[in-house]
Image (spheres, rainbow, N blue to C red):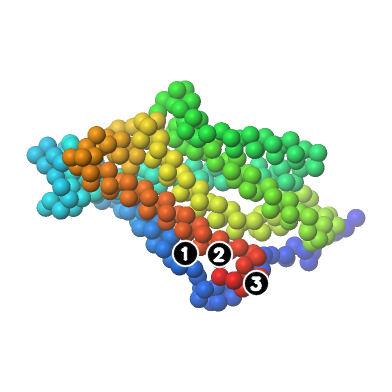
Amino acid sequence: MPDTSTTSPVDDARPLKPSLVKRLRKLPLTLYLGGTLVSLFVLVAMVSFVWTPYPANKLNLTNRLAPPGTPGFLFGTDRAGRDVVTELMLGARNSLYVSVVSTIIAMSLGALIGLSIAGSRRTLQGPFTRLVDAGLALPGILTALVLAAKLGPGNTTATLAIITWQVPVAARVTIGPARQILALDYVEAAYGYGRTKAYVLRRHVLPNISPLLIVLGSVMFAAAILIEAALAFLSVGVQPPTSSWGRFLNETQSLLEAAPYLMFFPGVAIVLTALGFNLLGDGLRTVLDPQQARTGVA
């Protein structure tokens, strides 16, 4: 029997990593733009834990519907006199929480399912892949409405709905590349050295598809923020008194003509944050894509 206690040459196989300095010089503009927008979003959300211009949900009826630029209220106030900047900061905190929790769980479960299917017997891969495809057909909004009917509206419902929608996506994206890597010669050589299927998936497949998963994660973050806002707008997600960009849009839609700025600021926040994650994902794909790394294309 082969000695599996020693390190084999195939165990050192890694994705090709070009010079770091060379890659930094060729970083795409989308990476800078996306990174800046995402960093700003995370910074605002983190600062809201320790400081906001006003206490959460503080009412100031003497300054109801104050326009932007009013002394003490940079972005104005809503119909209850609450500071818009404070509401936006607290909404960023909630969006960050929901998107981080749902995306990490969905990515972990999806990647595990995808790797398991790719490493299973060929006779089982087809049926399991079709089950994943069936999961892709589940509409996120309808799933959230069903969960809300059972669990009641709230952040938990929104988080579970996002996870239910994203797990099949992560699994489906993982299956194809994992199968391709499992068919490579050095993977067959690893089996020849007595490595188990689980070892090969962990040691060889996962490191090679990790760039793809990182890019997918950034895109799924953007989708999670949009879904959370949509669910809050439909009163299925976060409930008062917790602040949310989507709920803020819902509460102010009747004031579109009298105070359009109330919908403008949360709407722009949602768009810029989702755009930032998408640009970041596009930039990361350019930097981390193995094929581009081998050809030297930035």
Q: Please tell me which residue is depicted at 11% across the width and 42% down the height of the picture.
A: 63
Give the side of residue 44 with respect to residue 224, left or right.
left
Q: Residue at x 18, y 47 (%)?
A: 76
Task: Quarter of the image for the C terminus: give it.
Answer: bottom right
224 vs 215: above or below:
above
- Mark pair 1, 3: CA separation: 19 Å
Q: Is residue 245 above or below residue 275?
A: above
Residue 189, quarter of the rendered image: bottom right
Asked whether the residues under the numbered discs 2 and 1 touch, taking CB atoms below 8 Å apart as contact, a structural biologist would say: yes
Give percent across and percent down for residue 262: 24, 43
Which amino acid is tagged 2? Answer: Thr
- Name the residue located 79 percent from the left edge and 50 percent from the top edge: 196
**Callout 1: SS:** helix
Looking at the image, is mark 2 or mark 1 earlier in the sequence? 1
Q: Marks 3/2: CA distance? A: 12 Å
Question: On the picture, is 28 further left or further right than 232?
Answer: right
Q: Amino acid at mark 1?
A: Leu
Q: Which residue is disc 2 drawn over?
A: 286
Disc 1 or 3, which lies upstream in sequence?
Answer: 1
Q: Is residue 55 visible?
A: no
Q: Position of residue 38 (x, y in %)?
A: 41, 57
Q: Which residue is mark 1?
A: 31
Residue holding disc 3: 295
Residue sitting at the far left: 62
* Disc 2 crowd, CA 10 A, few/some/many (<14, 14-19, 20+): many
- Are the residues flagged by discs 1 and 3 in contact, CB closer than 8 Å? no
Check disc 3 and report its element: helix, strand or loop.
Answer: helix
Location of the N terminus by quadrant is bottom right
Q: Which amino acid does the dot numbered 3 rest on?
A: Thr
Q: Quadrant of residue 4?
A: bottom right
Q: Is residue 176 left or right of residue 216?
A: right
